[in-house]
Structure formats: structure tokens, C-alpha cells
Amino acid sequence: MPAIFLRLYLSKMYNENMKLEVPLRVDFAGGWLDVPRLSRPSSYIVNCAITPFVTKENWPYKKCSGVGGSAAWAILNGKDAVASELGNDVGWQDPAVIQETGLCVWKSGNRPVLEFKSNPSFLRNKMVIYWTGKSIQQKIWLIPLVITTR
């Protein structure tokens, strides 16, 4: 079997038979600076992949909650999530951090450029996400809260 057909066959097999799971994300700074028309030189986006992971069958988050669901859905369906998000006139940060995972700092611009990455384990059991009950269409977002302990 020629290599290109083999790759397509294996890709199709993987998409149909493997249970794929991906994280979603929260923003800490620089939201919307990943949208090409809003990007700014010398600016940064800070975000973090979060658990629990999602699958096509298990989606514990509210839809339209502002945690990168459309990018995760594109990835779960075998699509190029960066191209999908940019095609919707939104930014690339959701698929970038979902695929990279961790706590990430990205350069603002037309495409993802990772500047720094850290293991976010120091945030474990110190962060909660509060659902306001309003979808992103209503311009009310999830608010990441960092809780410190002494």
C-alpha cells in the first residue's frame, strides 16, 4: 500500500476506533490577543489546560462556557483545530494550549508561538472555576479563581 494511502487509512482507523480525550483551558491574561486582527507586538497570552478531560461521550462542562470547547470538539473530530478556530474569526489559543497542555505563555500574533511552558501541578487543588450560568454569547465568562492556602 503506498505510504499516503496507508497514512490516510491509519488516520481514519485512529479517529473511528480510539477513544480520544482532550483538556479544555482557562485564560489568565491576554485573552483575544490570539485573534490575528487584535494581536499586538510584544504582547502575550497566558493560559492553562484544565481537567477533567472531555471526550465525545463525556463532556462535563457547560456548552458555550468560554473554556475552549469548540477547539476541543474540532480536535475530537479529527480536524485542524487552529485552522478551524481562525476560520471562525476567533483565535488560536484554545487549540494551541489544548494540544500543548500545561501552563503556557504565548506570543501574540497570527499563529501560536510558545514562549514558556510550566507544569501546572502547583495549581492542583488551588483553583476553582465558577460557572456564572451565562453563556459566552451573553458576554459573561467563567472566572478562574486562584485560592491560596497558608
Image (cartoon, grey):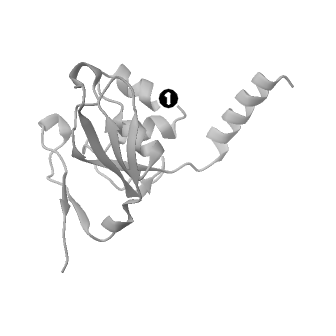
Can you say whether 110 is above or below 138 in the image?
above
Q: Nearer the viewer, residue 27 or 21?
A: 27
Quadrant that contains the N terminus = top right
- The residue positioned 55% from the left and 34% from the top of the image is 78
Q: x%, y% of residue 126? A: 26, 69
Can you say whether 19 is above or below 40 in the image?
below
Quadrant that contains the C terminus = bottom left
Q: x%, y% of residue 103? A: 36, 52
Q: x%, y% of residue 13? A: 70, 38
Q: Is residue 63 visible?
A: no
Q: Which residue is mark 1?
A: 80
Can you say whether 84 is above or below 22 in the image?
above
Q: Secondary structure at mark 1?
A: loop
Q: Is residue 61 left or right of residue 148?
A: right
Q: x%, y% of residue 101? A: 44, 50
Amino acid found under the numbered disc labelled 1: Asp
